[in-house]
Image (cartoon, grey):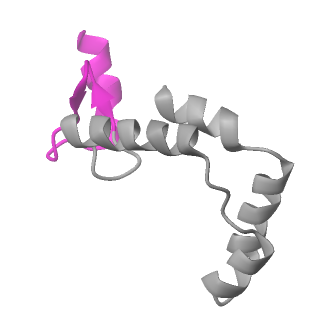
């Protein structure tokens, strides 16, 4: 949920345009892109991102998507399609 709150704070039309322009580049060039979209120093957002990173480390979330079932990562030997059977048993 914290990630969604962060996104709500920082996603504006400018950010949407910046993201669009980043992914629209065939060859990613951060230097040129950053000249057009300089990073604003927003300590509130950075604090929230640090907390989110700490939570991800504590919860052992290393990649997205990470599927949590009852607060625990889905074991590696299960696949996403297996969830329907697991949830039916609950």
Q: In this rendering, is residue 53 above or below 83?
A: below
The residue sitting at 47% across, 36% down in the picture is: 48
Q: Quadrant of residue 82?
A: top left
- Could you tell me residue 62's position as x and y percent? 27, 51
Q: Residue furthest bottom?
A: 27
Q: Quadrant of residue 43?
A: top right
Locate residue 71 relative to residue 39 in the image: left or right: left
Q: Quadrant of residue 90?
A: top left
The residue sitting at 23% across, 12% down in the picture is: 89
Residue segment shown in magenta: 67-90
Q: Nearer the viewer, residue 75 or 88?
A: 75
* Count of numbered tags: 0
- Could you tell me residue 45's position as x and y percent? 56, 41
> For residue 53: magenta?
no
Q: Nearer the viewer, residue 15 or 79?
A: 15
Q: Nearer the viewer, residue 89 or 7?
A: 7
- Could you tell me residue 41's position as x and y percent? 61, 54
Judge whether residue 63 can be spotted in this image: yes
Locate residue 13 relative to residue 25 in the image: left or right: right
The residue sitting at 22% across, 34% down in the picture is: 59
> For residue 88: magenta?
yes
Q: In this rendering, is residue 39 above or below 74?
A: below
- Could you tell me residue 68's position as x and y percent? 30, 30
């Amino acid at each position: 949920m914290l990630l969604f709150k962060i996104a709500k704070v920082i996603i504006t039309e400018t950010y949407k345009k910046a993201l669009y322009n980043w992914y629209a580049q065939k060859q990613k060039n951060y230097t040129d892109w950053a000249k057009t979209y300089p990073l604003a120093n927003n300590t509130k957002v950075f604090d929230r991102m640090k907390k989110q990173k700490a939570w991800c480390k504590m919860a052992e979330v290393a990649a997205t998507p990470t599927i949590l079932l009852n607060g625990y990562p889905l074991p590696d030997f299960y696949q996403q399609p297996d969830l329907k059977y697991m949830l039916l048993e609950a």
